[in-house]
Image (cartoon, coloured by chain):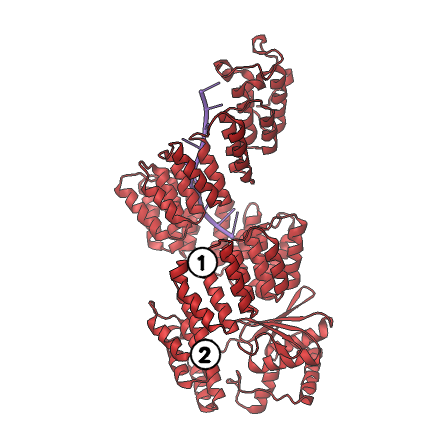
Amino acid sequence: MAIPNPSLVSLPRSHSLPTPNPNSITLNNDRYFANHPTLSLIDQCSETKQLKQIHAQMLRTGLFFDPFSASRLITAAALSPFPSLDYAQQVFDQIPHPNLYTWNTLIRAYASSSNPHQSLLIFIRMLHQSPDFPDKFTFPFLIKAASELEELFTGKAFHGMVIKVLLGSDVFILNSLIHFYAKCGELGLGYRVFVNMPRRDVVSWNSMITAFVQGGCPEEALELFREMETQNVKPNAITMVGVLSACAKKSDFEFGRWVHSYIERNRIGESLTLSNAMLDMYTKCGSVEDAKRLFDKMPEKDIVSWTTMLVGYAKIGEYDAAQGIFDTMPNQDIAAWNALISAYEQCGKPKEALKLFHELQLSKTAKPDEVTLVSTLSACAQLGAMDLGGWIHVYIKKQGMKLNCHLTTSLIDMYCKCGDLQKALVVFHSVERKDVFVWSAMIAGLAMHGHGKDAIDLFSKMQEAKVKPNAVTFTNILCACSHAGLVEEGRTFFNQMELVYGVLPGIKHYACMVDILGRAGLLEEAVELIEKMPMAPAASVWGALLGACTIHENVELAEQACSQLLELEPGNHGAYVLLSNIYAKAGKWDRVSGLRKLMRDVGLKKEPGCSSIEVDGIVHEFLVGDNSHPSSKKIYAKLDEIAARLETIGYVPNKSHLLQLVEEDDVKEQALFLHSEKLAIAFGLISTGQSQPIRIVKNLRVCGDCHLVAKLVSKLYDREILLRDRYRFHHFREGHCSCMDYW
DNA sequence: TTAGGGTTAG
């Protein structure tokens, strides 16, 4: 109904109050105002403007100075469907003596706002200004704020206060604490709260189940669900959302299906969220058909339902179907755009992702948010598209967006992978909040650029900042040791991982360690490490050993490593290429052709080398001997010129590298000179300014000859060349490479 | 005299 203008509402005389003197009014115990007609008008408001009219009326009649009545106004301002926290705060500041309820309302409103920090500030003000002490209602809000902020220390302090004021058994507070600890990544502490609870309700179980799911322990979540059953606690829809999410994480289709029927058997009330969770479970478990069946039956669908289907199709590579969903959904919010962009980005189609991003900018139906930019930056990183990446950085600044940790990580990653380590460092040092991912990304960046010692220094700084390294951090730091040839340091980190940092070495860490030892020529030690591994060595481990054998020309061990590798991954082209490299280096051409025949027999083709270079925001791609580029003629003319100039300084093609698939020597030499990175270098020379570095991204490892040519070109043409290959960066300058020929 | 904790996609 339309709300009457409060100034036109004539109140019964008895409801009017004399002009108030705030300090002399004591109305706390007057029950009468609860039914005051002005207060019931508050509930009928549908916008802040109407509240303000009532506010004015209340000030005029003096009703505002009744704490109960004022608190009703605050609640409406802060928690209604049209919340205005600024206004709520203004109202609050007018109240001479807010009561505990009023303080709690404001703390609560801020806790779930975009600025939870304000909750804590209000609480501190309350401690100074209010005669009341926080009660059982205050703490869940405060803990919620600490959860949102992921402020472990603050939340722990609240936990301590709770115990001190004897609220340590309050089930609401303890449930909040479970959620809080889990949100801060302290699953163990959350679980401790859970097991020590004197009494648990269904929310306690739900909190713990959700905590396990979101903390990456879906198995434990399902275990808890089973235990819940044995203890006769009846699960509700929220429980089932968590359980379905666990099935989705585990890709456990069978159990997911069982849960579906369980929900129907036990008549657990249908809800949109539950149906969406079910859709998500089916798509993640690989059955888009089941998801589609459910989707078609759903009486109500929201943007989540549509987006889930979209992602489902995108994940199985049915991009047309995904695009179809995108085109038919009632409205495409930014999340839908994000889903499609990130689908393309994550399945190795960064160009499609960027195309969509451009469409989004033109569409004006939605505006890029942090999530969009994270995916787009990642696509830029994959392509080495630094112009666009840099543009996004400027966009972030112009929009006044705050750099959250996700965005910071993506920016650092983009600059590193596009070859601008300095810019990455500037971003890194400019942000205050650095989580483990931000630190790890920077360490990875230093590693891929060959700054092993700097990476190790940064790792120490990370310790000083009290950020706990995770498995990824260790992969990156070991990678740094490997690229810089830091054997002793690598050994130390590897040995300390579990003992000092409590991070169990995984397959990746073993692979890095084998790589470190192997590159340094310690092949025996590398083999010993493999033999001692507590898990079966994966392909990456054998690959590392094989790579080391290539460098140190150990044919026998290479053959062993290769056969192990091919047993695990029969389709691994890289293995054949590396082994044939060794044969070629050792001049065993018969074995090279034997391998080539074997590859033909099992239907394998060498992954084609591809190099890309961004010029004026456009990414140009080149394959071996590519002549599809519009400037092809000029490129080949430039290549001829380069060849001639190289010859004058006595360059001889290094044919021992990566030549195994071409037999004739002259063809070999020609093919060598048509490698994709050389085409990209030639194109870079003719299409970029003298002062600009040439930035190239290659999908495979750079071959020895291209590496040599790049060094010589950097000197002859006085140009800096930055080449990113599959494993690391090479900075060519004045005839030298940053990798010191160790790659 | 008012109330609170746990929910899916990106």
Vertical order, A552 against A406 (above or below): below
**Can you say whether A494 is above or below A228 in the image?**
below
Name the foreground residue: A568 vs A404: A404
Of the pair A112 and A136, the residue shown nearer to us: A136
Q: Which mark, by number, is residue A250?
A: none
Residue A6 visible in image: yes
- Quadrant location of the N terminus of chain A in the rendered image: top right
Left or right, A157 with reference to A14: left
Label 2 resides on the chain identified as: A
**Residue positioned most to the top:** A13
Tell me what hue chain A is rendered in: red
Disc 2 to disc 1, how far (Cα)?
A: 27 Å
Q: Which chain is purple?
A: B
Q: Earlier in the sequence, mark 2 or mark 1?
A: 1
Q: Which residue is mark 1?
A: A470
Q: Residue A604, percent across and down?
A: 45, 78
Same-chain status of marks 2 and 1: yes
Chain that bears disc 1 = A
Q: Amino acid at mark 2?
A: Ala
Left or right: residue A388 versus residue A202 is: right
Q: Which mark is residue A548?
A: 2
Q: Would you say residue A320 is visible in this rendering?
A: no
Looking at the picture, how far across and down is residue A334, in whole percent?
A: 58, 48
- Identify the residue at image location x=70%, y=86%: A645
